Protein backbone atom coordinates (compact mmCIF):
# COMPACT_ATOMS: atom_id res chain seq x y z
CA UNK A 1 0.00 0.00 0.00
CA UNK A 2 1.17 3.52 -0.74
CA UNK A 3 -0.27 6.49 1.12
CA UNK A 4 0.71 10.15 1.28
CA UNK A 5 -0.01 12.80 3.88
CA UNK A 6 -0.23 16.42 2.86
CA UNK A 7 -1.30 19.55 4.63
CA UNK A 8 0.20 22.84 5.84
CA UNK A 9 3.36 22.92 7.96
CA UNK A 10 2.58 22.24 11.62
CA UNK A 11 -0.59 20.27 10.94
CA UNK A 12 0.97 17.16 12.53
CA UNK A 13 2.04 15.14 9.48
CA UNK A 14 5.33 14.06 11.05
CA UNK A 15 3.69 12.90 14.28
CA UNK A 16 1.02 10.94 12.40
CA UNK A 17 3.59 9.53 9.97
CA UNK A 18 5.54 8.05 12.89
CA UNK A 19 2.44 6.56 14.55
CA UNK A 20 1.10 5.14 11.27
CA UNK A 21 4.47 3.69 10.27
CA UNK A 22 4.60 1.74 13.55
CA UNK A 23 1.02 0.47 13.27
CA UNK A 24 0.95 -0.44 9.57
CA UNK A 25 4.63 -1.16 8.92
CA UNK A 26 5.02 1.67 6.44
CA UNK A 27 8.48 2.75 5.40
CA UNK A 28 8.35 6.52 5.86
CA UNK A 29 9.68 8.87 3.20
CA UNK A 30 10.05 12.33 4.75
CA UNK A 31 12.01 14.70 2.54
CA UNK A 32 12.12 17.36 5.26
CA UNK A 33 13.84 14.92 7.68
CA UNK A 34 16.26 13.74 4.99
CA UNK A 35 17.21 17.32 4.07
CA UNK A 36 17.62 18.45 7.70
CA UNK A 37 19.85 15.44 8.37
CA UNK A 38 22.04 16.36 5.36
CA UNK A 39 22.31 19.96 6.62
CA UNK A 40 23.35 18.81 10.09
CA UNK A 41 25.97 16.49 8.54
CA UNK A 42 27.33 19.39 6.50
CA UNK A 43 27.27 17.17 3.40
CA UNK A 44 27.42 18.43 -0.21
CA UNK A 45 23.68 18.01 -0.50
CA UNK A 46 23.18 19.71 2.88
CA UNK A 47 25.19 22.76 1.76
CA UNK A 48 23.14 22.97 -1.43
CA UNK A 49 19.77 22.92 0.31
CA UNK A 50 20.38 24.82 3.57
CA UNK A 51 19.41 28.25 2.25
CA UNK A 52 16.11 26.94 0.84
CA UNK A 53 15.17 25.43 4.18
CA UNK A 54 16.14 28.59 6.04
CA UNK A 55 14.00 30.72 3.73
CA UNK A 56 11.00 28.36 3.92
CA UNK A 57 10.89 27.88 0.15
CA UNK A 58 10.86 24.63 -1.81
CA UNK A 59 14.08 22.87 -2.77
CA UNK A 60 14.48 22.53 -6.59
CA UNK A 61 12.84 19.54 -8.23
CA UNK A 62 16.04 18.08 -9.69
CA UNK A 63 17.31 17.46 -6.14
CA UNK A 64 13.94 16.20 -4.89
CA UNK A 65 13.35 13.86 -7.85
CA UNK A 66 16.78 12.28 -7.39
CA UNK A 67 15.95 11.52 -3.74
CA UNK A 68 12.59 10.05 -4.76
CA UNK A 69 14.17 7.85 -7.43
CA UNK A 70 16.76 6.52 -4.98
CA UNK A 71 14.10 5.84 -2.36
CA UNK A 72 11.66 4.08 -4.71
CA UNK A 73 14.49 2.01 -6.22
CA UNK A 74 15.28 0.65 -2.76
CA UNK A 75 11.71 0.28 -1.48
CA UNK A 76 9.51 -0.80 -4.36
CA UNK A 77 8.26 -3.89 -2.50
CA UNK A 78 7.42 -1.97 0.69
CA UNK A 79 4.34 -0.33 2.12
CA UNK A 80 5.25 3.35 1.79
CA UNK A 81 4.09 6.48 3.55
CA UNK A 82 5.08 9.77 1.87
CA UNK A 83 5.27 12.58 4.41
CA UNK A 84 5.42 16.06 2.90
CA UNK A 85 5.99 14.87 -0.66
CA UNK A 86 4.68 15.79 -3.19
CA UNK A 87 4.29 19.49 -2.55
CA UNK A 88 3.54 20.71 -6.07
CA UNK A 89 1.57 19.45 -9.05
CA UNK A 90 4.80 18.75 -10.93
CA UNK A 91 6.03 16.63 -8.05
CA UNK A 92 2.68 14.80 -7.87
CA UNK A 93 2.86 13.99 -11.58
CA UNK A 94 6.48 12.89 -11.25
CA UNK A 95 5.52 10.55 -8.39
CA UNK A 96 2.65 9.09 -10.41
CA UNK A 97 5.02 8.45 -13.32
CA UNK A 98 7.80 6.98 -11.17
CA UNK A 99 5.34 4.63 -9.46
CA UNK A 100 3.80 3.59 -12.79
CA UNK A 101 7.26 2.72 -14.14
CA UNK A 102 7.52 0.22 -11.29
CA UNK A 103 3.99 -1.10 -11.91
CA UNK A 104 2.73 0.67 -8.78
CA UNK A 105 0.22 3.40 -7.96
CA UNK A 106 -0.87 5.57 -5.07
CA UNK A 107 -3.72 4.22 -2.92
CA UNK A 108 -4.58 7.10 -0.59
CA UNK A 109 -3.76 10.85 -0.61
CA UNK A 110 -4.81 12.24 2.74
CA UNK A 111 -5.10 15.97 3.38
CA UNK A 112 -4.81 17.10 7.01
CA UNK A 113 -6.63 20.34 7.68
CA UNK A 114 -6.09 22.98 10.40
CA UNK A 115 -6.95 26.69 10.78
CA UNK A 116 -4.06 29.13 10.28
CA UNK A 117 -3.96 30.64 13.81
CA UNK A 118 -3.71 27.16 15.31
CA UNK A 119 -0.92 26.25 12.86
CA UNK A 120 1.12 29.29 13.87
CA UNK A 121 0.64 28.52 17.57
CA UNK A 122 1.74 24.92 17.04
CA UNK A 123 4.82 25.81 15.00
CA UNK A 124 6.02 28.42 17.49
CA UNK A 125 5.69 25.82 20.29
CA UNK A 126 7.24 22.94 18.37
CA UNK A 127 10.50 21.28 19.44
CA UNK A 128 12.17 18.16 18.07
CA UNK A 129 14.80 15.66 19.10
CA UNK A 130 17.82 15.91 16.75
CA UNK A 131 18.75 12.29 17.58
CA UNK A 132 15.52 10.26 17.23
CA UNK A 133 13.41 12.94 15.43
CA UNK A 134 10.56 12.68 17.94
CA UNK A 135 8.37 15.79 17.85
CA UNK A 136 7.04 17.66 20.91
CA UNK A 137 4.80 20.65 21.34
CA UNK A 138 4.83 22.85 24.42
CA UNK A 139 1.16 23.71 23.84
CA UNK A 140 -0.17 20.16 23.38
CA UNK A 141 2.41 17.38 23.88
CA UNK A 142 5.28 18.66 26.07
CA UNK A 143 8.19 16.40 27.09
CA UNK A 144 8.09 14.96 30.64
CA UNK A 145 11.29 16.83 31.54
CA UNK A 146 11.55 20.37 30.19
CA UNK A 147 13.81 20.53 27.12
CA UNK A 148 14.76 16.82 27.09
CA UNK A 149 13.57 13.99 24.81
CA UNK A 150 11.46 11.40 26.71
CA UNK A 151 12.76 8.64 24.48
CA UNK A 152 16.53 9.16 24.27
CA UNK A 153 17.23 12.01 26.74
CA UNK A 154 18.78 14.21 24.04
CA UNK A 155 18.41 18.00 24.38
CA UNK A 156 15.44 19.20 22.31
CA UNK A 157 15.87 21.81 19.58
CA UNK A 158 13.69 24.31 17.77
CA UNK A 159 13.73 24.05 13.96
CA UNK A 160 15.44 27.09 12.46
CA UNK A 161 12.48 27.53 10.06
CA UNK A 162 9.96 27.65 12.94
CA UNK A 163 10.24 31.43 13.40
CA UNK A 164 7.38 33.84 12.67
CA UNK A 165 8.68 35.17 9.32
CA UNK A 166 9.61 31.81 7.85
CA UNK A 167 6.34 30.31 9.06
CA UNK A 168 4.41 33.00 7.18
CA UNK A 169 6.44 32.26 4.03
CA UNK A 170 5.91 28.49 4.34
CA UNK A 171 2.15 28.95 4.72
CA UNK A 172 2.08 31.13 1.63
CA UNK A 173 4.09 28.53 -0.34
CA UNK A 174 1.64 25.87 0.86
CA UNK A 175 -1.44 27.77 -0.29
CA UNK A 176 0.06 28.60 -3.69
CA UNK A 177 1.86 25.40 -4.56
CA UNK A 178 0.59 22.50 -2.47
CA UNK A 179 -3.10 23.15 -1.95
CA UNK A 180 -3.87 22.55 -5.68
CA UNK A 181 -3.07 18.88 -4.99
CA UNK A 182 -6.62 18.56 -3.59
CA UNK A 183 -8.19 18.74 -7.05
CA UNK A 184 -5.48 16.61 -8.60
CA UNK A 185 -5.98 13.76 -6.13
CA UNK A 186 -9.76 14.08 -6.35
CA UNK A 187 -9.42 13.54 -10.08
CA UNK A 188 -7.44 10.33 -9.41
CA UNK A 189 -10.09 9.18 -6.87
CA UNK A 190 -7.57 8.71 -4.07
CA UNK A 191 -8.35 11.89 -2.09
CA UNK A 192 -9.39 11.77 1.59
CA UNK A 193 -9.28 14.45 4.24
CA UNK A 194 -9.31 14.76 8.00
CA UNK A 195 -9.51 17.61 10.47
CA UNK A 196 -6.36 17.83 12.61
CA UNK A 197 -7.60 20.01 15.46
CA UNK A 198 -8.05 17.20 18.03
CA UNK A 199 -5.32 15.40 20.01
CA UNK A 200 -2.67 13.35 18.13
CA UNK A 201 -4.35 10.14 19.40
CA UNK A 202 -7.78 11.18 18.10
CA UNK A 203 -6.38 12.24 14.72
CA UNK A 204 -4.50 8.93 14.58
CA UNK A 205 -7.78 7.04 15.19
CA UNK A 206 -9.51 8.95 12.39
CA UNK A 207 -6.69 8.28 9.92
CA UNK A 208 -6.48 4.62 10.96
CA UNK A 209 -10.18 4.22 10.15
CA UNK A 210 -9.59 5.63 6.65
CA UNK A 211 -6.68 3.23 6.09
CA UNK A 212 -8.59 0.25 7.55
CA UNK A 213 -11.49 1.08 5.22
CA UNK A 214 -9.09 0.94 2.30
CA UNK A 215 -7.45 -2.33 3.48
CA UNK A 216 -10.87 -4.00 3.96
CA UNK A 217 -11.86 -3.06 0.42
CA UNK A 218 -8.77 -4.74 -1.08
P1 LIG B 1 8.98 19.93 6.32
O1 LIG B 1 9.86 19.21 7.27
O2 LIG B 1 8.09 18.99 5.55
O3 LIG B 1 8.22 21.07 6.96
O4 LIG B 1 9.95 20.61 5.21
C1 LIG B 1 10.92 21.56 5.58
C2 LIG B 1 11.52 22.20 4.35
O5 LIG B 1 12.13 21.18 3.52
C3 LIG B 1 10.54 22.90 3.43
O6 LIG B 1 10.24 24.23 3.87
C4 LIG B 1 11.32 22.88 2.11
O7 LIG B 1 12.36 23.83 2.09
C5 LIG B 1 11.96 21.50 2.14
N1 LIG B 1 11.08 20.46 1.54
C6 LIG B 1 10.44 19.45 2.19
N2 LIG B 1 9.72 18.70 1.35
C7 LIG B 1 9.91 19.25 0.11
C8 LIG B 1 9.42 18.94 -1.20
N3 LIG B 1 8.57 17.93 -1.43
N4 LIG B 1 9.83 19.73 -2.23
C9 LIG B 1 10.69 20.76 -2.06
N5 LIG B 1 11.16 21.12 -0.84
C10 LIG B 1 10.80 20.37 0.23
Image: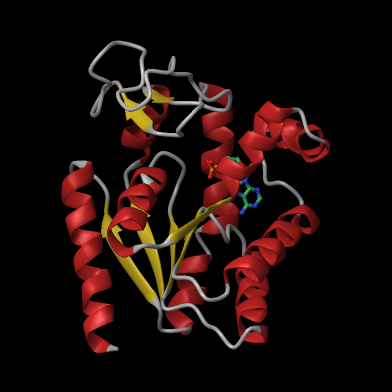
| Residue situated in front as seen by the camera: 112 or 100 | 100
Residue 141 image offset from top left, x and y in percent: 24, 28
**Does 178 sit above or below residue 100?**
above
Residue displayed at 78% across by 34% down: 43
Q: Which image quarter: residue 91?
A: bottom right
- Is residue 89 at all visible to an observer of this figure? no
Residue displayed at 38% across by 52% down: 17
Q: Please count the marks in the image.
A: 0
Determine the quadrant in which ligand 1 lies.
top right
| Residue situated in front as seen by the camera: 175 or 77 | 77
Q: Quadrant of the N terminus?
A: bottom left
**Does 60 sit above or below residue 213?**
above
| Colouring used for the render | secondary structure
Residue displayed at 59% across by 88% down: 103
Q: Quadrant of the C terminus?
A: bottom left
Q: Is residue 161 left or right of residue 26?
A: right
Residue 127 image offset from top left, x and y in percent: 41, 24
Q: Is residue 4 left or right of residue 143?
A: right
Amino acid sequence: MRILLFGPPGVGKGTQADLLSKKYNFIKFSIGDILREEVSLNSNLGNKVESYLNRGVLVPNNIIFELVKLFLGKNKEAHILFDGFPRTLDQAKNLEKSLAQLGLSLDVALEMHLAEDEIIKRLLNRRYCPKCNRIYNYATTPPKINGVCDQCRTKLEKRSDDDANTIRKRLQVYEEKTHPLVDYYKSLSVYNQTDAISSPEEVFDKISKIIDGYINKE
